């Protein structure tokens, strides 16, 4: 029984990885289930066994990507105590993860829009979790050394919107590079928007990253 479960889980992960690549390359409507099956070395029947429709498969890919990104940010935060540095680390990790994994960025930020309302709802669900995390980090930071004259939920939404816009411009127009070129300015704008100043160590690291 355990072997069967492990095999099914391995197949599911292989399908998700293949689907992630195809959706990123072609978008939702242009993606063929046959291509996902071929790329994952499985069958079309296997795809539909795990994911009864292409929309369910796409939503599973989105959920998987969101979980991976959120986990990377939380892992990076686990060893950091200073509240301002925690904000900077969250920002840096999010942007760097997207830059290292263009497939992830394309699926979450660009390629799903052809799917319409279904994509929008799923994206809102995933991004709401990131807004909540940013809000928690903002609450920690401004409690210590920032301005309390603003709504941290709104500020968190602005932060996420700014990050995604920089990434979309990079994906669609080819620049500026979010880490090498945009990060110092992005960090300054976002931190100062809530009455905070960047730490010297993190700013220097991003400038040379």
Image (tube, helix red, strand yellow):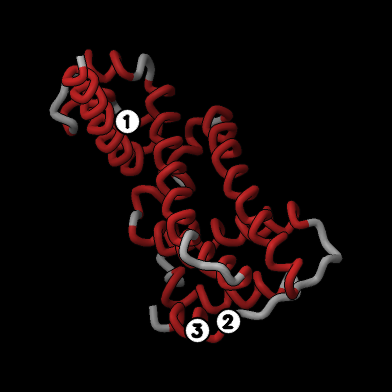
Alpha-carbon span between mark 3 and mark 2? 6 Å
Per the rendering, the mark at residue 12 is none
Alpha-carbon span between mark 3 and mark 1? 44 Å
Q: Which residue is mark 3?
A: 201
| Residues marked 3 and 2 touching at CB (< 8 Å) | yes
Q: Which residue is at 34% across, 31% downward?
A: 30
Query: Looking at the rendering, which quadrant does residue 32 occupy?
Result: top left
Q: Which residue is mark 1?
A: 31
Q: Residues within 10 Å of mark 2 (few under 14, many from 20)?
A: few
Query: Looking at the rendering, which quadrant does residue 118 occupy?
Result: top right
Q: Nearer the viewer, residue 132 or 121?
A: 132
| Position above or below: 26 against 72 | above
Residue 51 x/y as whole percent: 35, 19
Q: Which residue is at 52% across, 33% downward?
A: 119
| Position above or below: 112 against 92 | above
Q: For this view, does 50 lie left or right of residue 97?
A: left
């Amino acid at each position: 029984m355990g072997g069967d479960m492990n095999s099914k889980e391995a197949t599911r992960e292989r399908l998700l990885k293949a689907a992630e690549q195809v959706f990123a390359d072609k978008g939702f409507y242009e993606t063929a289930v046959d291509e996902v099956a071929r790329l994952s070395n499985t069958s079309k029947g296997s795809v539909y066994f795990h994911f009864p429709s292409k929309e369910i498969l796409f939503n599973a890919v989105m959920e998987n990507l969101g979980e991976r990104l959120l986990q990377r940010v939380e892992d990076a935060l686990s060893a950091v105590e200073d509240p301002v540095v925690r904000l900077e680390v969250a920002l840096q990790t999010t942007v760097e993860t997207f830059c290292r994994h263009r497939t992830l960025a394309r699926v979450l930020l660009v390629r799903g829009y052809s799917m319409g309302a279904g994509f929008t709802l799923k994206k809102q669900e995933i991004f709401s979790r990131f807004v909540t995390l940013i809000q928690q980090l903002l609450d920690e930071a401004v409690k210590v050394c920032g301005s309390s004259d603003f709504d941290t939920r709104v500020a968190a939404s602005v932060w996420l919107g700014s990050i995604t816009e920089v990434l979309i411009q990079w994906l669609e127009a080819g620049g500026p590079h979010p880490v090498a070129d945009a990060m110092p300015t992005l960090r300054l704008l976002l931190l100062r928007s809530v009455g905070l100043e960047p730490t010297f160590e993190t700013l220097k690291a991003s400038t040379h990253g």
